[in-house]
Amino acid sequence: MKKTFALFLFILLVVFQSACKKNSTDDTPTPDNTPAKNVSVLVQPNQTDANYATSEQSHYVVRNTKTHLNKLFLFIGGSYSVPKDYNLVCDNSATIGLDVISLSYPNDIAAFSMSNSSDPNGFKNFRDEICFGNQVSSVVDVNVLNCIVTRTTKLLIFLKNTYPSENWGQYLSSTNTILWNKVILSGHSQGSGHACYLGKYNLAERVVMFSGPNDYSTYFSSPANWLSQSGQTPTNKHFSLLHTQDEIVPFTYQVANLRALGVLPLGQNPLLVDNLVAPYNNLRNFSLNIPALSFHNSPTGANAILPNIWTYMLTTQ
């Protein structure tokens, strides 16, 4: 009897150990309960190419650890700004699942300084040189190495090689050219015009402009001629957010620019969204009249209504 009972216990033990061993090697994935968070890094341009000066401001790069929409939010800041100045809109973009780059680029000459130029192509040449490095402008000196496209490309290559598990390479072709159809082009002030100009020559996922574009010629009393030229990114993929009391570039000039661009019908003004919620009448051009220390900077600021507006502009179809 004792031997039989001992044998029974032994069999139970073997079965139990076998079950435990099976469970320990089970292919069923263990749920990851780690909360999603944004992870940001600063990358000096010199890290992407030794030919950049070590004194340059760092690119600001943000990525969410769990949510991935597989789209790049390429943000281009305004005149004299630093990439991390735009951490609020960039961090919000990463939270919703966009991979984010706020780019360091030559921005020490304001676009609006061209407003009284007698050169009908002054604004266009300004944009072309900063975006593509073509030596066509009389007011900026930006070569191919220092232009926005090259800086973005070199940063993406660096991120692809440095963080191989993060899939930054999805934004580059096999020959390391930018896959623009996966890129949301965005910017503030001067940067909004660069984003829009890049969208003229590349089919981007969309163009999102804050406090711009600002290319209004007071000399000719009209929007810059490049705005009305046909482009690769459809007009129904352009979004804008302005402030009605903009103290840097008059709201009326910005509205005229949007109409010249073809994204705002004649006679229609950007929808005032201070007291509205998504989907904002399913429109794409918006205005604010919120209090702010700087009305020009307020569309990328800290007001509580902004994240919902940003999210709509970045994700609505």
Image (spheres, helix red, strand yellow):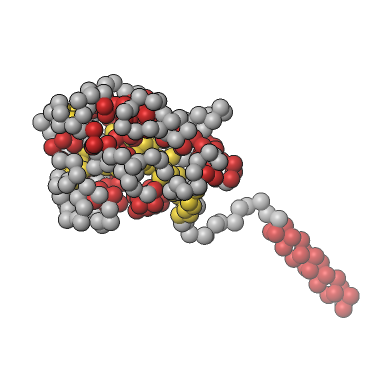
Quadrant location of residue 283?
Answer: top left
Q: Is residue 175 above or below residue 249?
A: above
Relative placement, left or right, of 129 versus 11 is left
Relative placement, left or right, of 200 versus 18 is left
Residue at the limit of the structure toward the bottom, as seen here: 2
Q: Is residue 190 above or below residue 202?
A: below
- Which image quadrant: the C terminus? top left
Q: Is residue 3 above or below residue 241?
A: below
Relative placement, left or right, of 302 versus 29 is left
Total marks in image: 0
Quadrant location of residue 72?
Answer: top left
Location of residue 124 in the rendering, given as x and y in whole percent from the top left corner:
29, 26
Residue at the limit of the structure toward the top, as seen here: 230
Asked whether the viewer can see residue 199, the reply is: no
Q: Residue at 44% across / 35% down in the picture?
A: 146
Residue at the limit of the structure toward the left, as seen here: 267
Q: Residue at 39% across / 48% down in the picture?
A: 83
Q: Report the front residue among 55 and 49.
A: 55
Q: Report the front residue among 276 and 268.
A: 268
Location of residue 128 in the rendering, given as x and y in whole percent from the top left corner:
35, 27
Location of residue 115 in the rendering, given as x and y in whole percent from the top left corner:
20, 33
Location of residue 35 in the rendering, given as x and y in whole percent from the top left corner:
48, 59
Q: Residue at 20% across / 56% down in the picture?
A: 293
Q: Residue at 72% across / 63% down in the picture?
A: 20
- Which image quadrant: the N terminus? bottom right
Asked whether the viewer can see residue 27, the reply is: yes
